């Protein structure tokens, strides 16, 4: 008899398995229909011996000390600040758009102040800022929007930015300084030995049994359990009673090249050329030394594994119907990016799973994460913590304040 059947061994399922087993001495069966743990964050050494992410680039970043401390119990970290270039007008320029992007594009030598004035002169006021088009056009105007955002978004989502919630393109800021990092979070690092190793450490507990290559429906009725935690697509759980919730898929084309370096940046975005959106070169992310190099192209697809919920009002309405059904389904907890239909990053899913555990146990979340406990794995080697300086933009606001305002 298991206390919990957990469907999905990604961040949501693995955090809950670890907490229920190690934190509450529960017996847990975790099943995944894929042949591996880790969900979309799964990484592995390919045939050339290079560590790659099967489902596209996964860069860990968070402002939550609790989430970082919790995961640090299962991995050491490699400091890593992500950088992206975009191929625009025949050159590679920093993305997010910053002072250097503008000076390179327009062949100018503007200061931050001049850039702020320049983009203010291009910006088209939008009130309210409702869509992914509004967000960008209201900050930098139509020309830069078209060069960097419009076609990338149409490729990625098969929707015009005007048909997507503001939150999608708002993930990528506009800066008037020279900060060329993709993220500005306090903690930015990659698991030193990869994500899969971290998941192995999380799930390494005598109370946790793992079944791979198994759809949960194959074990229902065969394996007794008290409660279920479900991290798959919520519409699938309910046999699409209200119709399909749109999820966007990707096809990943992996290649290995017989050269030490393929491109000048970890990720190059192609907003306007090609049918793929971006190319990632993994050795930048992992720090691995190898005479060859492995890359992945991302081709957006309508069909295939569900990777992204599609944030727009009509989908939220449909999700609300499924959520009402989920809320009234006894003994099943829905958690994670697909089960709660939220465009969440790994740290947000970890936080969501810790919050669910806290609620199940009637604890505060800080207590639930148990970060004060003696680390089981890293007693002698402290995790490397990377504290990025908070860059300031022209208005004197930190990007964190800007982010907070946006919420
Ligand atoms: P998943 O990882 O999707 O896990 C759900 C698991 O449930 C899957 O393994 C699935 O096989 C299993 N499952 C579903 N249905 C069933 C069933 N019926 N029976 C058995 N098993 C089932 N986040 C970041 O923080 N940084 C990044 O750089 C980043 N990059 C990303 C890049 C791409 C291309 C994608 C797609 C996502 C990226 N993310 C990134 C987001 C990150 O992948 C997710 O936040 C995280 O993996 C979600 O974890 P999860 O447990 O909710 O879901
Ligand atoms: N985006 C864009 N151009 C870019 C990068 C991003 O238009 O060069 C938009 C696009 O709509 C994308 C969204 O911003 O889907 C979020 O980008 P992010 O890099 O966060 O996407 P993810 O890594 O989640 O795929």
Image (spheres, grey):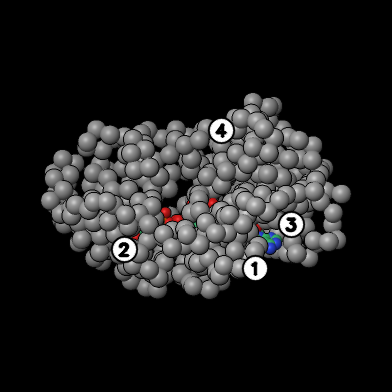
Q: Which residue is mark 4?
A: 66
Mark pair 3, 4: CA separation: 27 Å
Q: Give the position of the C terminus as an image quadrant.
A: top left
The quadrant in which residue 264 appears is bottom left
Q: Which residue is mark 2?
A: 162
Q: Which residue is mark 1?
A: 239
Mark 1 Cα shell of 10 Å, populated few (<14), some (14-19), many (≥20): few
Residue 383 versus residue 215 in the image, above or below? above
Position of residue 17 measured from the top left corner of the image (x, y, whole percent): 71, 45
Name the residue nearer the viewer: 281 or 119: 119
Q: Mark 3: is the Cβ under 8 angstroms from ligand 1?
A: yes
Contact flag, marks 4 and 1 (Cβ < 8 Å): no
Q: Earlier in the sequence, mark 3 or mark 1?
A: 3
Q: Earlier in the sequence, mark 2 or mark 3?
A: 3
Position of residue 91 measured from the top left corner of the image (x, y, whole percent): 27, 62
Q: Which residue is mark 3?
A: 31
Question: Quadrant location of ligand 2?
Answer: bottom left
Contact flag, marks 3 and 4 (Cβ < 8 Å): no
Contact flag, marks 3 and 1 (Cβ < 8 Å): no
């Amino acid at each position: 008899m298991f206390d919990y059947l957990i469907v999905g061994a990604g961040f949501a399922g693995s955090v809950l398995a670890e907490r229920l087993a190690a934190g509450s001495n529960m017996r847990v069966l975790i099943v995944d229909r894929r042949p591996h743990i880790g969900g979309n964050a799964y990484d592995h050494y390919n045939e050339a011996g290079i560590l790659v992410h099967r489902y596209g680039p996964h860069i860990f970043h968070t402002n939550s000390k609790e989430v970082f401390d919790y995961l640090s119990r299962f991995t050491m970290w490699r400091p890593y600040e992500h950088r992206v270039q975009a191929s625009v007008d025949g050159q590679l320029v920093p993305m997010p758009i910053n002072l250097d992007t503008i000076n390179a594009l327009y062949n100018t030598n503007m200061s931050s102040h001049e850039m702020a004035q320049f983009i203010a002169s291009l910006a088209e006021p939008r009130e309210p800022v409702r869509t992914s088009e509004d967000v960008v056009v209201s900050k930098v105007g139509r020309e830069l929007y078209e060069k960097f955002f419009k076609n990338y978004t149409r490729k990625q989502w098969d929707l015009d930015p005007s048909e997507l919630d503001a939150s999608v393109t708002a993930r990528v800021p506009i800066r008037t300084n020279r900060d060329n990092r993709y993220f500005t979070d306090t903690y930015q690092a990659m698991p030193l030995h990869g994500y899969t190793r971290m998941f192995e450490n999380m799930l390494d507990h005598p109370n946790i049994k793992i079944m791979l290559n198994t759809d949960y429906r194959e074990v229902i009725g065969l394996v007794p359990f008290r409660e279920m935690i479900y991290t798959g697509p919520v519409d699938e759980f309910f046999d699409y009673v209200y119709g399909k919730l749109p999820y966007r898929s990707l096809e990943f084309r992996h290649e290995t090249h017989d050269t030490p370096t393929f491109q000048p940046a970890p990720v190059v975005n192609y907003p306007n050329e090609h049918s793929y959106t971006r190319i990632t070169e993994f050795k930048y992310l992992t720090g691995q030394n190898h005479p060859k190099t492995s890359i992945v192209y991302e081709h957006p697809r309508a069909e295939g594994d569900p990777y992204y919920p599609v944030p727009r009002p009509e989908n939220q309405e449909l999700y609300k119907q499924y959520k009402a059904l989920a809320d009234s389904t006894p003994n099943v907890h829905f958690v994670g990016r697909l089960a709660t239909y939220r465009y969440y990053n790994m740290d947000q899913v970890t936080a969501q799973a810790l919050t669910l555990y806290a609620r199940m146990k009637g604890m505060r979340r800080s207590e639930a994460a148990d970060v004060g406990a003696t680390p089981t794995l890293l007693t002698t080697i402290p995790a490397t913590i990377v504290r990025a300086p908070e860059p300031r933009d022209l208005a004197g606001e930190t990007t964190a304040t800007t982010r907070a305002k946006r919420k």
